[in-house]
Image (cartoon, helix red, strand yellow):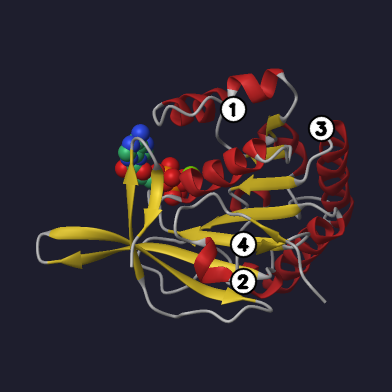
Amino acid sequence: MIVERITSGIIGLDDLIGGGFQKGKTYLISGEAGTGKTIFCLQFTLEGITKGENTVYLTIDERPTHLVQDAATFGWDLEAPIREKHLNIIDITPEFSELRVGRFKGNVENEKIIDEIRDQVKKVKAKRVVIDPIAPMFASSENQFQLREYIRQLMFSLDDLGTTNLVSSIIDTGSNMISKFGVEEFFASGVIVLWMEREEMVYDRVMMVRKMRGTPIDLRVRKFTIDSKTGITLYG
Ligand SMILES: Nc1ncnc2c1ncn2[C@@H]1O[C@H](COP(=O)(O)OP(=O)(O)OP(=O)(O)O)[C@@H](O)[C@H]1O
Ligand SMILES: [Mg+2]
């Protein structure tokens, strides 16, 4: 069976992952603060818009206007696609102040959030969904078993939407985990990890494709740059 691939929007990455992400699946992009997760998500979004694949972008704890401004520093215009209803950026922080998954009534809240995402996807007939970042959706004090269950439910529900999804997860500084809660990577179809490597007095930005179901991967660490004209570009 031939699997349809969705291009990532990151120059140099698709060749490493069999031509792109598998359509309809959910992928994780993780890294410590400032490693480029949001820029990666923005490039995935813009690639979608360029290809006529409408996108829903969910932010939590970050204002959509800030995202629009950050994108503009690269010369990327998000206002036009928003106006033309090709892009829907939603700050779900207000809903989460009441609904934060697992904080009070658990399951019910999780379903409400999934319904909300489903509604937004319908509204713009989205083909791509981004959640950047996933961590604030979950109360970290939640017991580990419950937390794992909520994350599993959310990520499996994303798979049921038919959209191709990118979820970012922040890695705590200095931790040797590859996600915030240490479970996101199990439920994602693929995982890309971003970090910085020190060489004497300089840090290099690097990434590795850590997991990609149904796709052979090269485990070499790749250097990349973030450039104000092209965003993330992968080398080697
Ligand atoms: N216009 C730009 N040109 C070049 N580099 C930029 C530009 N805008 C941001 N950067 C660089 O990209 C880095 C990564 O930013 P990004 O917001 O994607 O990180 P992040 O992993 O999402 O961080 P956080 O976990 O805090 O959300 C920034 O720290 C900055 O150095
Ligand atoms: Mg970010």
Indicate left or right for 154 with 182 as reference.
Answer: right
Label of residue 206 in the image: none
Figure quadrant of the N terminus: bottom right
Question: How far apart are labels 1 and 2 at the CA level?
Answer: 26 Å
Above or below residue 162? Residue 178 is below
Q: What residue is pinned by disc 2?
A: 185
Sequence-wise, the earlier of marks 1 and 3 is: 1
Q: Kindly report which numbered mark, 2 or 4, lies closer to the viewer in this rendering.
A: 4
Question: How far apart are labels 3 and 2 at the CA level?
Answer: 28 Å
Q: What residue is pinned by disc 3?
A: 124
Sequence-wise, the earlier of marks 3 and 2 is: 3
Sequence-wise, the earlier of marks 3 and 4 is: 4
Indicate the secondary structure of the residue bearing disc 4. Answer: loop
Above or below residue 95? Residue 16 is below
Sequence-wise, the earlier of marks 4 and 1 is: 4
Q: What residue is pinned by disc 1?
A: 64
Q: Residue 26 in the image: x percent, y percent?
A: 71, 61
Q: Residues within 10 Å of mark 4 (few under 14, many from 20)?
A: some
Question: How far apart are labels 4 and 1 at the CA level?
Answer: 27 Å
Q: What residue is pinned by disc 4?
A: 20
Indicate left or right for 51 with 104 as reference.
Answer: left
Do labels 1 and 2 touch, CB within 8 Å?
no
Indicate the secondary structure of the residue bearing disc 3. Answer: loop
Indicate left or right for 221 with 132 as reference.
Answer: left
Indicate left or right for 196 with 18 as reference.
Answer: left
> What amino acid type is highlighted by mark number 3?
Val
Residue 113 quadrant: top right
Q: Inspect this view and state whether residue 110 appears.
A: yes
Question: How far apart are labels 1 and 3 at the CA level?
Answer: 17 Å
